[in-house]
Amino acid sequence: MHYTSLMVYLDLDQRNDARLKIAGDLAERFGARVIGIAARGEVVPLYFTEGLAATYVVAQDVAEIEKRLREAEARFRSALAGRAQTIEWRQAVSPPFPFVAAACRAADIVIVGSPTAELPPDPDLDLAPADLIMNAGRPVLMVPPEVDKVAAEHVLVAWKDTPQSRRAVLLALPFLRACRKVIVAAIDEDDDVPATQASVDDVVAWLGCHGVGATSRVLPPLDDVASRIESLAGEEGADLVVSGAYGHGKIREWVFGSVTKDFLKQTSRCHLLAH
């Protein structure tokens, strides 16, 4: 498995420098093409605005969106010039999520920025990373605003024996094969260390079959799973955490508002998430 087609989403209201640099680095590392993509829904006129006034408001808004999309395209082309096999740009004046989710079929991995606001995103204006992870059918690489490099020489796999985690590890193989150190860590949620250890050992052995040397860690049950995983990543010098997203667990539900959401808030390293 190899990443031959990358997609990077550009926000119109945030800086995109970090993810553009990472997209360029990964394009050079994997010899991949890069697709830049952006979208923004048009304004809905106030209920008391109608007729020609409403038409004017919409036309003005669309013109402004198209201008900002052209600016985003120019930044994308400038940042990726000479760094990718080929580059391609896609844009739409429409709500971002359905447009980007459909376009994910053209990529092996999708690069997006980490959420920066506490308030829920406006679906007409913003791409909600949680929605994309659930529906992309591709791994999503979350890039914090101030992290502009993912060497992925030391990678932490936050293992949980779910279909989502199995898929995440499979889809992360291009990174794992190229790194120097992989740790597969699991939380012993069932208070059964031998069973948890056996699960992790199976993953380590499977990675070995794919040329990836990995070691295992089993951690005691914890309430704050995301913080413990992040702490371990810091201890081990990992700049990439690989994890399944939005499954279920006995101590905590890995669903919206819990572990995956906590991962999305982390700002110190990139996360590769798959559902």
Image (cartoon, rainbow, N blue to C red):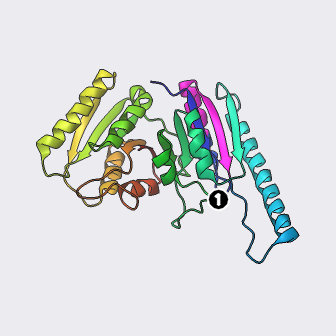
Q: Is residue 157 visible?
A: no
Q: Is residue 98 visible?
A: yes
Q: Is residue 244 above or below residue 48?
A: above
Q: In terms of secondary structure, where does tag 1 sit? A: loop
* Outermost residue to the bottom: 48
* Outermost residue to the front: 51
Q: Is residue 30 left or right of residue 260?
A: right
Residue 191: x and y in percent read 13, 52
Q: Nearer the viewer, residue 246 or 169?
A: 246
Q: Quadrant of the C terminus?
A: top left
Count of marks, rendered view:
1
Q: Is residue 106 left or right of residue 134?
A: right
Q: Quadrant of the N terminus?
A: top left
Residue 133: x and y in percent read 47, 47
Q: Is residue 99 left or right of residue 93?
A: left
Mark 1 Cα within 10 Å, few/some/many (few <14, many 20+)?
many
Task: Report which quarter residue 158 is drawn in.
Answer: top left
Which residue is the site of mark 1?
A: 125
Q: Is residue 57 left or right of residue 149?
A: right
Residue at 32% over, 41% down: 163
Residue at 55% over, 46% down: 112
Residue at 40% over, 59% down: 256
Residue at 28% over, 44% down: 160
Residue 78: x and y in percent read 73, 38
Write the start and end of the magenta stretch as one range.
Answer: 21-39
Residue 68, magenta (yes or no) = no
Which amino acid is tagged 1?
Answer: Leu
Residue 38, magenta (yes or no) = yes
Q: Is residue 113 above or below residue 29?
A: below
